[in-house]
């Protein structure tokens, strides 16, 4: 019995020592992330930062139990990525100098982990991530339904799901605006605002109003400044603004100026697309039908391709295969295309519908909605 008590005492002492050695204060660095990983013995928990597109390990801990502690130095708030070595998933966390985050990791799905302790920005960021996970799951559900409808060639279902997706995206952006405003006094508000500006469907005027309401110290952050740069650019291509003119080479290398085509048009659609873009190619048959119907009445289309360098043959083949019998230009510079950058294009397909005066009257309309807007603007121009 005496030997058993001694063994128990030594065992407990070992646990106590291990626990003491697993305190943040014993880890170097001005910032720490600690927490638990159920059945974590033998696993490695690490925190990484992205340098370009490559993850770089900041610190790691080989677990002897369920507890982990990570320590590192940072000089400003930043988003780092926590993961279990060997797993493709990671958990983004917002950390600030001098902070200690406490996290309960979910070994089955690290994105469902709980941030239990942190400053206001860190906790707000964790809540924001949970919202993003909800949006992502809802989108996946729609995508699965869409694939099934395509396989069954159920065009009514396809149309209904597309409308649902458009409504879902609209609500998502609206929710993000509200969430950014709720966090105007902490860094998460700026991070959300930056994310909003990379959405295809967002209102730059509303985004500028949110920026103006951010706390002064939040406005100075790199996230808010990046958002402001894009907002100011997008304000120049907002609905109601006159579309900026541009010039780019056609398939024969001859420069075409947008304003010259506009002079020949009652309605001009600027269509950003690429041969590699499947959603673009799926939409093309519907655009072709609209063009055939309304081109004699004053519709013109100017396709701006974001094809890659050296992919001219693929660009030309897609034009021929899809029967795109309208104006085309491309600098063959992929996402670095100067026209796309001038217009702040972040995803394709993207369209702008211009009236006869070159004013942007609508953006990113599809199928029936695109046709209805074109008809409306042609009728409007014909009455003048």
Image (cartoon, rainbow, N blue to C red):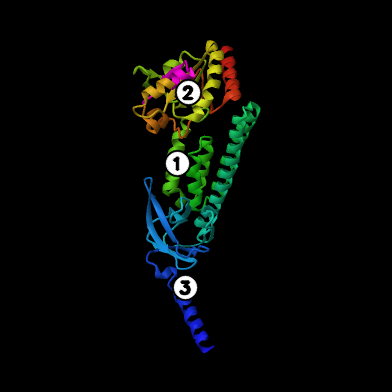
Badge 2 crowding class, 10 Å Cα cut-off, few under 14, some 14 to 19, many 20 or more, is many
CA–CA distance in space, label 1 to label 3: 46 Å
Residue 93 position within the rendered picture, expressed as x and y whole percent measured from the top left: 47, 55
Q: Secondary structure at mark 3?
A: helix
Residue 193's label in the rendered image is none
Q: Quadrant of residue 148?
A: top right
Look at the image and tell me in which quarter the C terminus lies.
top right
Q: Secondary structure at mark 1?
A: helix
Badge 1 crowding class, 10 Å Cα cut-off, few under 14, some 14 to 19, many 20 or more, is many
Q: Which residues are magenta?
A: 318-331
CA–CA distance in space, label 2 to label 1: 25 Å
Closer-to-camera residue (361/253): 253
Badge 3 crowding class, 10 Å Cα cut-off, few under 14, some 14 to 19, many 20 or more, is few
Give the labeled residue for mark 2.
270
What residue is shown at x 48% (from left), y 39% (from top)? Answer: 198
Mark 2 and mark 3 lie on one chain; the one further toward the N terminus is: 3
Closer-to-camera residue (347/241): 347
Residue 19's label in the rendered image is 3
Residue 379 position within the rendered picture, expressed as x and y whole percent measured from the top left: 59, 15
What residue is shown at x 56% (from left), y 17% (from top)? Answer: 289
CA–CA distance in space, label 2 to label 3: 63 Å
Q: In this rendering, does residue 384 appear at all?
A: no
Q: In this rendering, does residue 339 appear at all?
A: yes
Closer-to-camera residue (383/86): 86
Side of 74 relative to 299 (left or right): left
Residue 228's label in the rendered image is 1
| Magenta-colored stretch includes residue 321 | yes
Side of 116 relative to 276 (left or right): right
Closer-to-camera residue (298/13): 13
Whether pointer 1 and pointer 3 mark residues with C-beta atoms closer than 8 Å, the reply is no
Q: Determine whether 36 is above or below 201 in the image.
A: below
């Amino acid at each position: 019995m005496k030997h058993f008590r001694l063994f128990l005492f030594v065992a407990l002492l070992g646990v106590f020592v291990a626990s003491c050695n697993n305190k943040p204060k014993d880890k170097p660095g001005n910032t720490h992330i600690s927490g638990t990983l159920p059945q974590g013995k033998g696993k490695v928990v690490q925190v990484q930062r992205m340098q370009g597109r490559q993850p770089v390990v900041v610190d790691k801990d080989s677990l002897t139990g369920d507890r982990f502690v990570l320590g590192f130095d940072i000089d400003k708030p930043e988003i780092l990525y926590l993961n279990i070595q060997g797993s493709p998933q990671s958990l983004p966390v917002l950390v600030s100098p001098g902070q200690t985050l406490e996290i309960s990791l979910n070994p089955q799905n690290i994105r469902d982990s709980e941030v239990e302790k942190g400053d206001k920005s860190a906790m707000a960021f964790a809540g924001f991530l949970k919202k993003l996970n909800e949006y992502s799951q809802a989108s996946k559900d729609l995508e699965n339904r869409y694939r099934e409808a395509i396989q069954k060639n159920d065009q009514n279902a396809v149309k209904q799901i597309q409308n649902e997706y458009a409504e879902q995206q609209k609500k998502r952006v609206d929710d993000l605006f509200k969430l950014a405003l709720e966090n105007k006094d902490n860094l998460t508000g700026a991070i959300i605002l930056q994310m909003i500006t990379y959405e295809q469907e967002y209102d730059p005027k509303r985004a500028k109003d949110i920026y103006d309401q951010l706390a002064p110290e939040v406005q100075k952050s790199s996230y808010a400044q990046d958002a402001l740069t894009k907002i100011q650019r997008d304000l120049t291509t907002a609905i109601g603004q006159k579309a900026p003119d541009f010039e780019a080479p056609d398939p024969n290398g001859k420069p075409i100026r947008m304003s010259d085509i506009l002079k020949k048009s009652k309605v001009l659609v600027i269509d950003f697309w690429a041969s590699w873009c499947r959603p673009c190619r799926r939409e093309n048959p519907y655009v072709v039908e609209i063009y055939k119907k309304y081109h004699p009445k004053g519709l013109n289309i100017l396709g701006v391709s974001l094809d890659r360098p050296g992919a001219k043959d693929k660009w030309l083949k897609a034009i021929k295969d899809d029967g795109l019998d309208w104006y085309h230009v491309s600098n063959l510079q992929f996402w670095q295309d100067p026209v796309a950058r001038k217009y702040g294009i972040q995803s394709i397909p993207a369209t702008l519908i211009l009236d006869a005066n070159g004013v942007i009257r609508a953006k990113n309309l599809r199928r029936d909605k695109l046709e209805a807007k074109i008809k409306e603007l042609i009728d409007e121009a014909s009455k003048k």
